[in-house]
Amino acid sequence: MPKSSFFAAAFLAGATTLACAAPLSKRQPVDFFADTPSRSLQGTATRSDGRLIPGPSVGPVNVKLGPDLLWTMIAHGDSLLVGTGPEGRILNINPNQRGEIPAEVLADLPETHVFALVRLPNGDILAGTSPQGTLVLIRKGAVIARAALPVDSVLELLVLPETGQVLAATGNPGRIYRVDPAAFAAGGDDPARLATDEALAARGLTLFGEIRDRNIRRLLRQPDGRIIAGSAPRGNLYEFPAAGGPPRILVENRNAEVTALLPWSGGFYAALTFTSQPSDARVNRPQRPPAPENQGGPTGNAENEPAPAPPPPPAPEPPRAERFNGRSQLLWVRDGGFPEVVASRNQTAFYDLHRHQDIILITGGEQGELFGYDPATQRSLTFPGAIPAQINALLPAARIPGAFYALGNNPAGLSLVNFPGVSVRSAETRRLDLGVPAEIGAVRFGAGTRIAAERLQVDLRASFGSDEAEGWTDWQKAVLQDGGWRVAGLRGRHVQLRLRPSGHDFEIDRAELHYLPQNRRPSLQEFRVLPAHYALVPAPEAPPAISTSLGQLLQNTGREEAPRRSPSPASQVAPQTGAQVVLWSVTDPDGDNLVATFSLRRAGDTDWTDIIVNTRDSHAQFDISHLPEGVYQTRLVVAETDPRPVTDRLSVTFGTDDLLVDRTPPEILEAGVARDAGNLVVTMRTRDALSLLTGVEFMLNNGHKGTVEHPADGILDGQEETFTFGITAAAAAGATSLELTVHDAAGNNASRRLALP
């Protein structure tokens, strides 16, 4: 194939047809589970199938707390006992009081962190501390017994109901001690560390079991007396016999922490957090300092009072904690069965588990999230978030059936999670990015929605910017029309959706937000003028597809695409005098159907001649043999067509590459051949009026031939060039004449024959 033909075929392989459009209007799916943050829920919950359902209200309890970290919480009658650090205090909080609730100090221990608390049957309180590893027995606010175990931390305390004894889980090393409260109390307040088995036994402490992992973090007693233990930092689950002894490993992990265990019929659930960070590092995060006061200007009378001193500079903000990069799992361990991961979350830590009716409540972080899991439907839940960033513990509210108190940090606080006491229900999605500015249409909910229209209010707002707080329209109430909720005239690139259902029994399915993107103009990707005198031979078009592909359904293609009428990469080109082919590649960012008009005019003229009009093809083929020689300007007018409404169609005019019509061959000014030591030295000077020269071919009448594309000045860049080259005596042997042919870029040539000296 000639070089120019190969070039044309290569370009055809890369050319694309005018884009065939998808529907003009688009649909943005709204999955309430994925698109609604926990803190944007109030009285509602989201489910992992994307639906919105009733949930609890979550609000702060007005408790006056200090700067301590809140580690653990237990019930103490109608009050709550909270273990703190690093002051090592046990706080007594009565959340049923009105107004600001004081936090009374039940005990102020010399130890630092109170990690474990348990209330004994006689009303005494047993506390475990870290990093001193002490057990402290408190009766009516007074410490009556204390002992330091041969460990660093006491992390969990579990009362055995049959005997009233207590199991104490420890860290470094990971052990479980059996504690006899009466014998322990008899030993009094002796902080000396107990180093031997005899010394431990004298204080009512015996070794129940031991593991090789560093810490036993959680304990759970099964109905048959077996003890389940969860460890850290590996995150293993162990099973101890009721009488104690060597454990059996149920689940093995790495770089994990068992943060909670929950009994359930037929087995138990375990919360695991996978991370290299210990729990105290996850919870003890830097907080923003309070805003400096008195930042305004002078407020006194300038004549009678001196202006106050300028405010001090703001205190430097501590570095923000990095986002938690671990993950968490909810594990179901069936009695006699294999463990099964039933729920998981990335970049979130699970802290505690509790049962509410037939669902599991999960406290977590890093944004104060409250989660859930429904074993019956095997779906995850997201509940409204709390003000504290990490929710460590959950406890049923004694006087409010169906409600829970949640303990959290950053900032330290107590929250009420109230399932029956909900007065306002709402859910607000995160910012939904439509990708381009658009006219917002209807919001339509799925067929699984179960709520009367009069019990649901839908609001929308939009913004052209991505800032979370600036540039938004006001919330606008949507009107129900033809099954969809609409706000007339709403436009933007980013949209938020707010739902306000009422009642206690509803289910709102996933939604679709319909919108019409801004109509953007087509763009010219490439335009090429093929060498003249080559015609295009299109390859046969492939038969149309009969079936609909899965991709078409997933892309919501609701109408037939325009037929593809572009040269196939398999198309060929063939020499044809006077033929000219131009190719272009045009795309439309919105997928509109396009038509193109290609026109040309001679330089200096004013009128355009349309070569092809309103074509869906991406090429034009025409004859130039009748056109006067010279340079022609070209243009391509691309316009949108159906199904875009006529009033909305855009058109763009592209000034494209010039076309040169040149039928005059080059002029040979000089040509000569001489001998030098038997070799031939050929010189040729030539000129072309319109086109650049491309080279010289030579042929001896003995059959030897060749091509010269290197002029005397070294650069082939002009319309006048001199070519000088040599032919060896061996190549010229027997020859008597030489034919020279010069070519220009338009495909014209001129020849001259020279006799050899």
Image: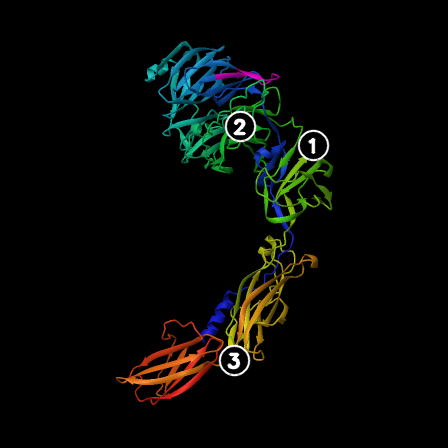
C-alpha span from label 1 to label 3: 85 Å
Residue reaching furthest to the left: 677
Magenta segment, which residues? 90-103
Q: Disc 1 on helix, strand or loop?
A: loop
Q: Is residue 509 visible?
A: no
In-front residue for pair 733/234 = 733
**Which residue type does callout 2 highlight?**
Pro
Q: Which of the two discs, 1 and 3, sits closer to the camera?
A: 3
Point out residue 583 in the picture as x, y percentages from the top left corner.
Answer: 54, 68
Q: Magenta includes 319?
A: no
C-alpha span from label 1 to label 2: 28 Å
In-front residue for pair 665/532 = 665
Q: Which of the two discs, 3 and 2, sits closer to the camera?
A: 3
For mark 3, what is the residue? Answer: 663
Label 1 vs 2, first from the N-terminus: 2
**Which residue type does callout 1 highlight?**
Gly
Point out residue 708 in the picture as x, y percentages from the top left corner.
Answer: 38, 77
Quadrant position of the N terminus in the picture: bottom left
Q: Magenta includes 100?
A: yes
Q: Residues within 10 Å of mark 3 (few under 14, many from 20)?
A: many
In-front residue for pair 78/475 = 475
**Residue 80, disc:** none
For mark 2, what is the residue? Answer: 388
For mark 1, what is the residue? Answer: 503
The figure's colour scheme reads: rainbow
Q: Disc 2 on helix, strand or loop?
A: loop
Point out residue 297 in the picture as x, y percentages from the top left corner.
Answer: 56, 26
Label 3 vs 2, first from the N-terminus: 2
Q: Residues within 10 Å of mark 2 (few under 14, many from 20)?
A: many
